Amino acid sequence: MEFRHLVSFLAIADELHFGRAAARLHLTQPSLSQQLQRLERTLGVELVARTSHEVRLTSAGRAFEVEARAIVNRMGKAAQSAREAAAGRTGTISVGYNFPAGQHILPATLAKMHAEYPDVTVKLEEKRTGPQLAALAEGTLDIALVYGRPVTSDFQYRRLLQLPMVAVVGSGHKWAGRPGVPFAELARQPCILFDREQCPAMYDAILAAAERTGIRLTVAHVLDDPGATAILVSVKPLVGFASASRGMLAGSAVGGVRPVPVQLYDPVPTIDLYAVWRDSGANPLQEVFLDCLEAVGPFQIPAMRAETRAAR
């Protein structure tokens, strides 16, 4: 059974006139009649009864019309879906993001996407930089919103935002009442760091600031869980590190004590946020997302509030 035979049959069912049906399909009447005959032979039933005075569907023809019309409609929808997907107007895109991207990049970008591409599904996954880039390399992410410029030529990237970093301490820490401290004072404070592979750019920015200041950090703990870091600085005289974006977010107190941010200076450690993707062309929605990203930028962070919840 050929698809064109279904289309021809439905034209006859609509018009109940071979001449008008043939004209509608830009066919000759003999060609249309031959297609109907081939369809009827394939099915083994008569679909159309024709006399010199009328053309009508048989009972088999009326039953067949319902299913044939559904098939043709589904084929039309399938073709439209394929065209929309090829044009990047429908489908699914997987986007990884970190905390600042979720606060400052995604809301406006997703609003733009929804307004202009309502049939596109954006699948969001919050991950640290290292796991995001690994997922991007594996093809399970289409776009990564991460700290730091990638070092491999396999990735394309676009800088979105620069964020200062802050120290995070418990409310009982001697720094808690100070708006800022020189970076050099970290030389006398036990700190909490994290494995470099989880977030290389942030790790390197902290150590580069220490090197420029001529100090060596005292790393008392290595933790990869931001929540655990917040708890620990709340109950011990330790210093953690966070982006200023994290520092702006006021959160719940931990055991009755709220971690607070302290701005660092001389130097101010900073970290860049990037959009990163593989230029494979496998998903046309990559370009759609990046266009929306470009349209709603440039991005910036508001001024820091005094009370915040700490977490990297």
Image (cartoon, helix red, strand yellow):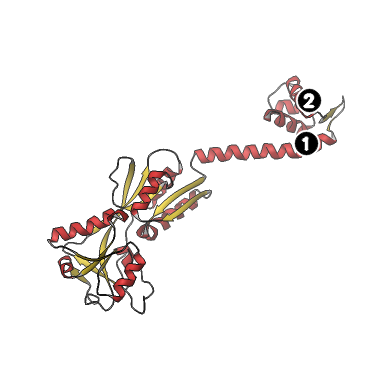
Element carrying mark 1 = helix
Is residue 261 left or right of 30 when viewed as pictured? left
**Residue 272 lies in quadrant:** bottom left
Point 48% across, 42% down: residue: 88
**Residue 165 lies in quadrant:** bottom left
Circle 1 packing at 10 Å, graded few (<14), some (14-19), many (20+), is some
In this view of the protein, which residue sits in the foreground, 179 or 140? Answer: 140
Work out whether mark 1 precedes mark 2 in sequence or the reverse, and give the earlier one: 2
In this view of the protein, which residue sits in the foreground, 10 or 280? Answer: 280
In this view of the protein, which residue sits in the foreground, 67 or 296? Answer: 67
Point 70% across, 40% down: residue: 70
- Please provide percent x and percent y for residue 109: 42, 53
- Which quarter of the figure is the N terminus placed in? top right
- Please provide percent x and percent y for residue 144: 38, 50
- Please provide percent x and percent y for residue 310: 32, 69
Callout in the foreground (1, 2): 2
Instruction: State the residue position of label 2.
Output: 41
Point 30% across, 47% down: residue: 150
Image position of 289 with respect to 17: above or below: below
Q: Are marks 1 and 2 in contact (CB under 8 Å)?
A: no
Residue 118: give its label.
none
Give the distance between the C-alpha atoms of the residues marked 1 and 2, in whole angstroms: 14 Å
As shown in the figure, which amino acid type bears the numbered disc 1? Phe
Instruction: State the residue position of label 1.
Output: 64
Residue 297 in view in this figure: no
As shown in the figure, which amino acid type bears the numbered disc 2? Arg
Image position of 264 with respect to 124: above or below: below
- Please provide percent x and percent y for residue 185: 16, 69
Image position of 222 with respect to 68: above or below: below
In this view of the protein, which residue sits in the foreground, 238 or 251? Answer: 238
